[in-house]
Image (tube, rainbow, N blue to C red):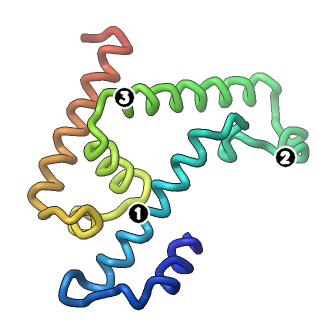
Amino acid sequence: MVEALVEAARNIGRFDDRKATFTAWLFGIARRQAQLEMRRQRRRKSVPESAQRTLQSLAEQSAPGDLAEEMVSRIEAQQQVSKLAGYLSATEMKVLVLRCLHQLSVKEIGQVLGRSERAIDSLLHRAKRKARERLAEDAGTV
């Protein structure tokens, strides 16, 4: 998130402590930078960085089937996340990403999104419930 720090340095003159705390202002910039990066990644047609492997690591694999199984598993997980993104609201998806991927607390998520902790807790609960229901439907267990 170096881009966020650079952006904050460029716009430090716009910071107004009457409108927000410095931390919340900085999280807002970081959130916008993360959203921009996510948009850029969605537009790319290349192999995601998390799925890329060096030749050295491929040579060290114990069995060729393991790599294939791992790749299939990753692709299936990405497809499930993609389906969830279409099923959940944008706010519910943001809350899940901030909590599960970035491991922010409910309070920190509230500061980033400009909502109360109670509202974030409710959004998080609803998003998790909807995600579980959707994944169960896709698995055919409902």
| Quadrant showing the N terminus | bottom right
Percent across and percent down for residue 83 are: 41, 25
Precedes in sequence: disc 3 or disc 1: 1
Residue of label 1: 31
Q: Nearer the viewer, mark 1 or mark 2?
A: 1
What is the spatial separation of the Cα atoms under label 2 and label 3, in whole angstroms?
32 Å
Give the SS element for disc 1.
Answer: helix
Q: Is 85 left or right of 105, judged from the image as shown?
A: right
Image point (85%, 39%), residue name: 58
Q: Nearer the viewer, mark 2 or mark 3?
A: 3
Precedes in sequence: disc 2 or disc 3: 2
Residue of label 2: 54
Q: Is 99 left or right of 37, judged from the image as shown?
A: left
Residue of label 3: 86
Q: Name the kind of residue labelled 3 in the image.
A: Gly
Circle 2: is it few (<14), some (14-19), or many (20+) Cα within 10 Å? few
Q: Name the kind of residue labelled 2 in the image.
A: Thr
